Amino acid sequence: MTQRIVVLVLFVLYFVAAVVINLVIDVRLDHRALDQTTVSLAIGEGIALYGLSGLLPFAIWGARGFRAARWASLFVPWAFFAAVVTIIGLGR
């Protein structure tokens, strides 16, 4: 598998994880019914989690030249920030 495909797969997996995390938070912790409104809200919050937690890692990766071989400099900090944003979201 080429480096670019690995990066693409990780982008997709991070987005899916962000949506699933928010869906679980909304259904399990907020005791909401699993309906269209809850799923729409989880997708919106997932997009926010995906984007906000990726801002700083994208800036770092961009400063290093957007090389697929340096994917760890993007995805490792992104996972950390996603966890932090999720923990902050649990406190709401």
Image (cartoon, grey):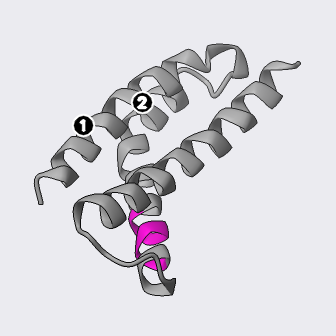
The amino acid pointed to by label 2 is Ala
Circle 1: element type: helix
The residue labelled by disc 1 is 84
In magenta, the rendered stretch is 40-45
Q: CA distance from mark 1 to mark 2?
A: 9 Å
Q: Is residue 28 left or right of residue 38?
A: left
Q: Is residue 45 left or right of residue 35?
A: left
Residue 51 in the image, given as x and y percentages of width and height = 44, 53
The residue labelled by disc 2 is 79
Residue 47 in the image, given as x and y percentages of width and height = 47, 61
Residue 58 in the image, given as x and y percentages of width and height = 48, 36
Q: Earlier in the sequence, mark 1 or mark 2?
A: 2
Q: Quadrant of the N terminus?
A: top right
Place residue 87 in its image quadrant. top left
The amino acid pointed to by label 1 is Val
Q: 53 or 91, which is in the foreground?
A: 91
Circle 2: element type: helix
Q: Magenta segment: does it hold 23?
A: no
Question: Residue at image x 44%, y 85%?
Answer: 37
> Which SS does the magenta portion mostly show?
helix
Question: Residue at image x 31%, y 75%?
Answer: 32
Q: Is residue 88 left or right of residue 66?
A: left
Q: Quadrant of the C terminus?
A: bottom left
Q: Hey, which residue is sitting farthest left in the picture?
A: 91
Residue 59 in the image, given as x and y percentages of width and height = 44, 35
Q: 65 or 13, which is in the foreground?
A: 13
Question: Residue at image x 44%, y 27%?
Answer: 60
Question: Residue at image x 52%, y 45%?
Answer: 17
Q: Magenta segment: does it hold 43?
A: yes
